[in-house]
Image (cartoon, helix red, strand yellow):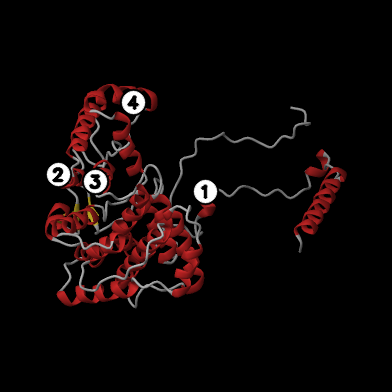
């Protein structure tokens, strides 16, 4: 039915209903005595009715049990300290730990690497679509649109087993990000190299350069330290999609949509802008004081998940300083240190993960548009683990709200007497 015809039909039905209501006779008091009255259901009459046994358990909101990670007394991935994994592991190994629970064997790791390499190849139709996307589009928007487009064509892709979901989507998302970036810059496309590790391939696809050993270590450390962090907002979005038994592609889109927010991965760009605004260590104290008075917070200093400093931030700060020494950005680190001391002196806040990550990526000459997509690639391991863990939960997660609105009141039209 055309929209105009539907509107006319609805208007006619509404007018008829109002006319019938205006002619409806109100029962008299004597007539009301003979009308059937439905008594309210008393407490004892509830006996025998089906009762949700989890209702009281959910009264304060969902409580998810997880074996993936814990933040106290330190950040552990399946029991392994995250700093040990960052120093002695690669991202594929750590992802396997998060998803499967144990360190992979050489055969299991080789299977993942083979599937990952296959997934680097984009379908011809998707590549053709990417070439038609306007160059002014934001990379994160392109990523979300591409996922939605592919869901229409090939829902259900992602490997033969739940464990294979991660390498499939890691390869597919990496190819989407790096291909679009090179198309946008008018650069020729390059193919991945099977002899390179994942992070080395990522750097190769971004820059057509094979990274030196120190840079490969840095990239692995960043990916591992950002791979998982409990029930962060983006992870909650992924778990809610899983609880509703949605597919992983849809859960992935939910996670990305949350991650791009200014209080999630999107905070990295804002944290970098702080250094541009302060400009010199001497101005740090006055700038921080004025900014706190004006807006109440400093980008990059909002994290409160730990009683002491975030261990990921401490590890990445050390890595960031080493990168700064290699790239001639030592002055940037001195400025960052001055800001950290000023924020602590005035607000007793410690840096969040976005504080060193933003500087590190900038020191590597990566543009801000890549910050959120790179976070998505790193957090994919944690999202996959939480999605699959939530699938094993017997009931859908229930989120309860606490009502703070108007008390009970009854409808009164404007022209009715009080």
| Residue 399 % position (x, y) | 43, 50
In front: label 2 or label 1: 2
Q: Are marks 3 and 4 in contact (CB under 8 Å)?
A: no
Residue at screen point 29% across, 70% down: 192
Residue furthest right as drawn: 23
Residue beneath disc 4: 292
Q: Nearer the viewer, residue 352 or 141?
A: 141
Disc with the residue nearer the chain's start (3 vs 1): 1
Element under label 2?
Answer: helix
Residue beneath disc 3: 363
Q: Are marks 2 and 3 in contact (CB under 8 Å)?
A: no
In front: label 4 or label 1: 4
Quadrant in the picture for the N terminus: bottom right
Query: Marks 3 and 4, how far apart in space?
Result: 27 Å
Query: Marks 2 and 1, how far apart in space?
Result: 72 Å
Residue beneath disc 2: 325
Residue at screen point 77% across, 31% down: 416
Q: Is residue 337 left or right of residue 117?
A: left
Q: Nearer the viewer, residue 12 or 178?
A: 178
Disc with the residue nearer the chain's start (2 vs 3): 2
Query: Marks 4 and 1, how far apart in space?
Result: 54 Å
Image vertical order of residue 185 relative to residue 122, above or below: above
Query: Marks 2 and 3, how far apart in space?
Result: 10 Å
Q: Is residue 199 left or right of residue 158?
A: left
Image vertical order of residue 230 relative to residue 29, above or below: below
| Residue 388 % position (x, y) | 33, 65
Residue at screen point 53% across, 35% down: 405
Q: Nearer the viewer, residue 405 or 104?
A: 104
Query: Marks 2 and 4, how far apart in space?
Result: 31 Å
Disc with the residue nearer the chain's start (2 vs 1): 1
Residue beneath disc 1: 43
Query: Marks 3 and 1, how far apart in space?
Result: 67 Å
């Amino acid at each position: 039915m055309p929209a105009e015809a539907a509107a006319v039909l609805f208007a006619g039905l509404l007018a008829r209903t109002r006319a019938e209501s205006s002619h409806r006779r109100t029962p008299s008091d004597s007539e009301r005595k003979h009308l059937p009255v439905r008594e309210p259901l008393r407490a004892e009459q509830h006996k025998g009715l089906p009762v949700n046994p989890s209702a009281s358990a959910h009264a304060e909101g969902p409580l998810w049990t997880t074996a993936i990670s814990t933040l106290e007394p330190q950040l552990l991935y399946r029991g392994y300290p995250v700093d040990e994994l960052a120093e002695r592991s690669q991202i594929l190994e750590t992802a396997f730990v998060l998803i499967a629970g144990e360190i992979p064997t050489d055969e299991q790791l080789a299977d993942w690497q083979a599937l990952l390499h296959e997934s680097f190849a984009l379908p011809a139709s998707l590549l053709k679509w990417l070439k038609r996307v306007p160059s002014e589009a934001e990379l994160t928007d392109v990523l979300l649109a591409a996922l939605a487009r592919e869901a229409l064509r090939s829902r259900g892709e992602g490997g033969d087993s739940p464990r294979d979901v991660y390498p499939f989507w890691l390869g597919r998302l990496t190819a989407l990000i790096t291909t679009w970036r090179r198309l946008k810059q008018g650069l020729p496309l390059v193919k991945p190299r099977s002899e390179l590790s994942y992070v080395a391939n990522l750097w190769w696809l971004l820059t057509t350069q094979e990274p030196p050993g120190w840079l490969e270590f840095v990239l692995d450390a960043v990916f591992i330290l950002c791979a998982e962090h409990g029930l962060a907002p983006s992870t909650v979005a992924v778990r809610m999609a899983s609880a509703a038994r949605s597919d992983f592609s849809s859960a992935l889109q939910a996670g990305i949509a949350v991650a791009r927010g200014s209080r999630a991965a999107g905070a990295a760009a804002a944290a970098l802008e702080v250094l541009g605004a302060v400009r010199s260590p001497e101005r740090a104290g006055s700038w921080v004081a004025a900014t706190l008075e004006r807006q109440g917070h400093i980008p990059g200093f909002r994290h409160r998940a730990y009683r002491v400093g975030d261990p990921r931030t401490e590890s990445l700060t050390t890595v960031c300083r080493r990168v700064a020494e290699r790239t001639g950005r030592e002055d940037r680190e001195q400025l960052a240190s001055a800001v950290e001391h000023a924020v602590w002196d005035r607000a007793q806040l410690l840096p969040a993960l976005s504080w060193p990550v933003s500087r590190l990526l900038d020191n590597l000459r990566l543009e801000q548009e890549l910050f959120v997509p790179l976070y998505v690639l790193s957090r994919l391991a944690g999202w996959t683990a939480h999605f699959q863990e939530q699938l094993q939960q017997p009931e859908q997660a229930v989120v309860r709200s606490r009502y703070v609105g108007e008390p009970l009141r009854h409808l009164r039209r404007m022209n009715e007497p009080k």
